[in-house]
Image (cartoon, rainbow, N blue to C red):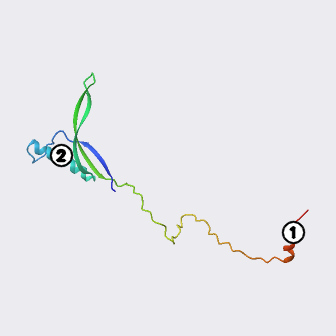
Amino acid sequence: MSTFEYKTICAPRKALKIKGVKGADDRYAQTLTDVINAQSADGWEYFRAESLPVDEKSGMMGKTEEKYLSLLIFRRENIETYEDPAFSPATAEEAPDPMILQPPEIEQVVEIEVEVSEEIATLGPATR
């Protein structure tokens, strides 16, 4: 599953003067194209444009006015997305990492049978 990160910038309010482009509409379209291409050079994909209300104070008395801002929204795939690894049982023969201190191997305990003489077996517990 991929996730995205988003970036929002204000859309340009004025068209730039561009040589060879005539008409205010065409200059504004070229200005938007330049902004979108500049963002895509950094890996951002144009997602959409929004016009959202913003309350802004104006004047000495601090009267608030509602103003609309045009925003350009860009997105790109989040590279640092963490996904849980699928469960995989450990293989039978994994080589230990030589850089990590390994516990010593413990040999199996071997039981040794010792014959006890009959004389020692007939003696009872020690008394004072």
Q: Earlier in the sequence, mark 2 or mark 1?
A: 2
Q: In the displayed structure, does residue 106 sit left or right of residue 65?
A: right
How far from the left and from the top, in percent, is residue 51? 21, 39
The vertical placement of 118 against 75, above or below, is: below
Could you tell me how far apart the alpha carbons at marks 2 and 1 are, in whole angstroms? Answer: 105 Å
How far from the left and from the top, in percent, is residue 112? 73, 76
Name of the residue lying farthest toward the left: 22
Q: Residue at x 85, y 77 (%)?
A: 118
How far from the left and from the top, in percent, is residue 48? 22, 47
Of circles 2 and 1, the one toward us is 1
Q: Residue at x 20, y 41 (%)?
A: 12
How many residues crowd around disc 2 within 10 Å: few (fewer than 14), some, or many (20 or more)? some
Determine the image quadrant of residue 25: top left
Type of amino acid at the residue the image marks with label 1: Gly
Q: Give the residue pinned by disc 2.
A: 32
How far from the left and from the top, in percent, is residue 55? 26, 31
**Nearer the observer, 120 or 93:** 120
Q: Mark number for residue 124?
A: 1
The vertical placement of 32 against 94, above or below, is: above
Q: Are the residues at dot 2 and dot 1 in contact (C-beta closer than 8 Å)? A: no
Determine the image quadrant of residue 128: bottom right
